[in-house]
Amino acid sequence: MDNMQLFKELRDLGDCDIRQEPAGSAKRATRVELPAGQFRKTAALFKKRGFLLLTLAGVDERQLNGHFAVYALLSPPTGKTILEVRIMLDPGHPVYPSITPVFPSAHWLEREMKDMLGIVPRGHPDLRRLAVHPDWPEHVFPLRKDFLAGSKVPRVDGEMVFCPVEGEGIYQIPVGPIHAGIIEPGHFRFFTFGEDVINLQAQLFYTHRGIEKTAEGKHFNAAALVAERVCAVCSASHAVAYAQAIEAMAGVAAPARARYIRSILLEMERLYNHVGDIGNMCAGIGFSFGISRGAILKERLMRMNMRLAGHRYLRGTVVPGGVKTELNKMPEIRSELDLLKKELKQLTTVMLSSQSLLDRMQTTGILPTEAAAALGAVGPAARASGVNRDLRRDLPYAAYSELTFQVPLQENGDVFCRLKQRMDECEQSFEILRQAFERLPQGDLTVEIPCLQPYQTAAGYTESARGANVHWVMSGPDNTIFRYAVRSAAHCNWPVVPLCLPGNIVPDFPLINKSFELCYACLDR
Amino acid sequence: MLKILEGLVKTKIVTENPATWGESCGRGLPVIHANACLPGCNKCEEACPTGAISGKAIDPKACITCHSCRQVCPAGAIDETDMPVILGSPSLEAAGRSLRERIKKVCKRSLHIRYVDAGACNGCDFEINAVTNPVYDIQQYGVDFAASPRHADMLLVTGVVTRNLEIALQKTFEACPRPTLVVAVGACACGGGIFKEAYAAGGGVDKHLPADVYVPGCPPTPALIIKGILAAIDRL
């Protein structure tokens, strides 16, 4: 795609201001400023040109320039430079034309912006509350600057609103927030006819802790501790994405050794997640052998993390500028990984030859390719439905541009494909790890981060075990954070899960949910 | 089928017991040696993201083991030690002891736990899951997880107790038949963790329920969690 051609078409649509970073700059973003009224038309142009929406973030900039702002981050169809579009809104009446009709993947992002900031997307098909529960009062917006951190908000009366599903013999099964197993909380409302699920709706955000607000005002190094704690099983992915955002903002690049170490940590994280999920999916069908063996292999991987990096979830390893410490016991870990690869193969061979497993998993919980692509699904769930997206290949970061790997793809989008996808990705991860250990270059572990210019923006992104994970940061004065927006893979995929239920029976839900294995904490923040 | 049997025979038993647990308890609790401190220096207290340090003492319940204190200490006065399990407050100690005696009598050598995630990052959640895996196998102690609070002798709670889950947590506690123990797992549950002042976070379990045992860490290892559960019923 010719940038000049794109910019000409942008200018033809109306006034806009385009700023490009110099070639080879560590900042890697083109910034476009538009009047709010042109937002949807411009989004349509980008959609036509094959751009994908990475995230949207609303910011209360009233103390800076008297306006609210909405930033949209888009990734190009080819090339590595992301696009950041900004519109400014009237402080008294912050309304803008919704881009959900153009990019359906924006629908939850825009609803959250409305709940957290009071910025209203005009023309959005569904303006019910999402991130705040029915007992949150109207007109209280936590991410506005005049809402002080730590304020306690009273409860009001309110009822959960679900889209009505009517018919003779239809009844509702409410499940959660507290579930029967050892799992995170969320509320699911099944609308069923007997056991057949007609419709599934979810009310999530039970583990909403207010992370984005917590990071505001913190020094960027202290905020790294918050970034790691959005979620535990995506901890390294969050830490690396956040560190990359700070590095991009400062215009520095982490040293080569640090980038390779980051890739190693990220692939170790991918491995323990996928191996854990492979075992856990057997729990959805009651296949005890698979559950136990998968759990043993996962435990071995967690202990390898502990010996390699000092923490089972790899916390405290990645910092803005590089990595904090050396990796330990690498030769041991390498030979253990080789052994584990063989044992994983034995486990998956047994699993794939089990007729009852195939019967339960094939044709269950199908996510159609068009739905996955339209709604912006990411990660193994999207690739299992044939949507070929992987940030490691499309927008390389850490050491991935120097490592050789395949991105496997499945076609049918059922639970079995999501299982197979994880098995194939594990094989790739073993290969990436082998290369990274072998080619690990000598050098420094960190680079110093210079003073950050205040009120600059930057994004960092990683492909976590669940998909594209984007951290967008706006700096404040004195090296603090002014605004921190996290769009994890779970945020992209949760809206897609309810689509996979109709046509299945209620007891298939735990299996379908486990085949996505999305983190509630990543979504809720 | 044959492959399964073959696999089982080759693997043998992987379960470990407390005497042979094959890993350390992780990044440990920092310990300040005050006699090695530089006079007038308060760098550790300023660096701590959760305010766990005051008067050169570290509150394990608030510590997230980030070791920022050790990094900034100019005198190298901060060491680390194993993370401890902490019993409930002294005033509850007497009540707790008699509660535990009653539970021991009632449960004999068996305990059923209801787990509640009250707003955690899922680290403690997955570690508690790990406690049921063949390596740790908490069932060997007669302890198991129940699907309903009505069947539970103990409530295992992780997370800060978010605003959105507070009511569900209360209802779960009320649904547990008495006597019931409450164990707070993880830095968030023990003291609010790094989200203490957040508008949606509730500051930890003991602001809402009476906690009998605290298992600090971010997250605590499965080994420490088992120690905490067994300590709550005086089994260790």
Image (cartoon, coloured by chain):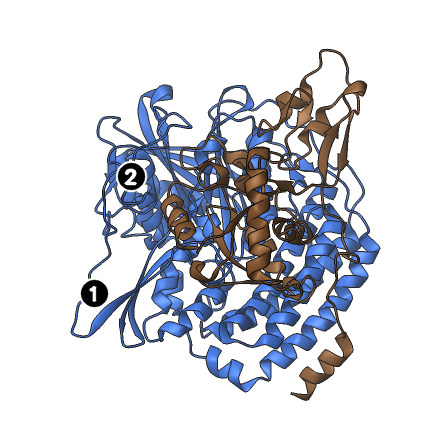
Chain colours: A blue, B brown
Across and down, in percent, residue A259 comes to 68, 44
Q: Residue at x 60, y 45 (%)?
A: B97
Across and down, in percent, residue A237 comes to 58, 48
Foreground tag (1 vs 2): 2
Across and down, in percent, residue B15 comes to 73, 66
Q: Farthest top residue?
A: B40
Camera-side residue: A58 or A127?
A127
Q: Farthest bottom residue?
A: B2
Q: Is residue B57 visible?
A: yes
Disc 1 marks which residue?
A165
> Is residue B225 positioned above or below B203 on the image?
below
Indicate the quadrant where residue A72 lies: top left
Disc 2, SS: loop
Residue A136, numbered circle: 2
Q: Residue at x 35, y 69 (%)?
A: A501
Q: Amino acid at mark 2?
A: Trp
Q: Is residue A233 visible?
A: no
Task: Tell me the subunit letter for badge 1.
Answer: A
Across and down, in percent, residue A242 comes to 56, 39
Is A257 situated left or right of A71 in this image?
Answer: right
